[in-house]
Amino acid sequence: MTVTVKMLVQKVKLNVVYATESLLGKEITTSDISRPGLEMTGYFDYYAPERLQLFGMKEWSYLTQMTSHNRYSVLKEMFKKDTPAVIVSRNLTIPEEMIQAAKEEGIALLSSRVSTSRLAGEMSYFLDASLAERTSVHGVLMDIYGMGVLIQGDSGIGKSETGLELVKRGHRLVADDRVDVYAKDEETLWGEPAEILRHLLEIRGVGIIDVMSLYGASAVKDSSQVQLAIYLENFEAGKVFDRLGNGNEEITFSGVSIPRIRIPVKTGRNVSVVIEAAAMNHRAKEMGFDATKTFEDRLTQLITKNEANQ
């Protein structure tokens, strides 16, 4: 995904001090944010100009103690063509030398009223998610009881129809057909729709429907964490399916593994209700309530009791 300075301004609600349209369109290539320290003393050996440069109270205080000539010289050296933007936090007064250097070197100069640490966190959160490598997977992503559930299966098995039934039951559609997944961090998987398919569902025999138009804004969601994968497969006599819920199968996307449950599909079976139950049961397990373990404990107690009575 391409992220521009303008997108950052809109998402994080930054104020534009100086920027042309071309500067706002400059691409941000890394989520790393630099707070210049040694650079203001003239040490540039390990300077990374491709990063956003963030000035907080410490940096601003040091700059204000410098002479006008030294301040301009350091900022002129710091502002490179590769630098996407320079941001000053806390609504600090921006020195004229900084504005002059930004104009001469063609760097967008932005400001924010929020604290430096909070601003750095907001920008990092947005950039980490936006610049993360995407993997496109076939399936339907639903938000079920606040949990992101990825429904997969063979073509024609009824994934989209199941998604529609879940929407009618009060759950929310995130993506149909193509789900773009990415790792937000080492343990969190996130999913979102392809822009061309946002809020759309394809139903065989009916065509493409706009879920937001038909069912309202509460029926859709722009993105969701992916916490559970469900694979729908045709029921076949003799095929073994997990009956106790202790299969512990997983699937990995972008280096992050999530649990996967295989659900057999056959005529007369209400798959959407089964998926709801699977989502609630998964959440219960995460909270420490494991029905499988309860059953196994009761079975062990029963066997022990029977052996004692013999």
Image: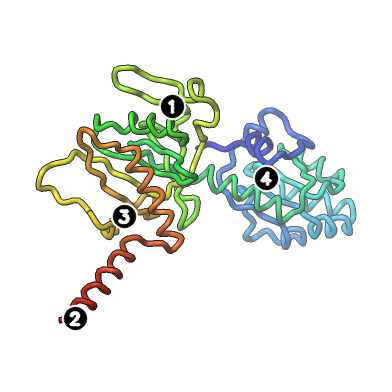
Q: CA distance from mark 1 to mark 4?
A: 39 Å
Estimate how packed mark 1 is, as few (under 14), some (14 to 19) or many (20 or more) residues with alpha carbons within 10 Å. Answer: some
Estimate how packed mark 4 is, as few (under 14), some (14 to 19) or many (20 or more) residues with alpha carbons within 10 Å. Answer: some
Disc 3 marks which residue?
250
Closer to the eye: label 2 or 3: 2
* Residue 229 at x, y percent in the picture: 35, 47
SS class of the residue under badge 4?
loop
In the rendered view, tell whether residue 19 sits above or below residue 182: above
Residue type pointed to by label 2: Asn
Residue type pointed to by label 3: Glu
Is residue 112 found left or right of 95 in the rendered image? left
Closer to the eye: label 4 or 2: 2
Residue 197: assigned label: 1
Q: CA distance from mark 2 to mark 3?
A: 42 Å
Which of marks 3 and 2 precedes in the sequence?
3
Which of marks 2 and 4 precedes in the sequence?
4
Residue type pointed to by label 4: Lys
In the rendered view, tell whether residue 174 sits above or below residue 145: above
Quadrant in which residue 60 is drawn: bottom right
Closer to the eye: label 2 or 1: 2
SS class of the residue under badge 3?
strand
Disc 2 marks which residue?
309
Closer to the eye: label 3 or 1: 3
User: Is the Cβ of the residue at disc 2 closer than 8 Å to that at disc 3?
Assistant: no
> Which residue appears at 47% of the width and 28% of the height?
198
* Residue 125 at x, y percent in the picture: 59, 49
Which of marks 1 and 3 precedes in the sequence?
1
Disc 4 marks which residue?
80
25 or 180, nearer to the observer: 180
Estimate how packed mark 3 is, as few (under 14), some (14 to 19) or many (20 or more) residues with alpha carbons within 10 Å. Answer: few
Q: Quadrant of the C terminus?
A: bottom left
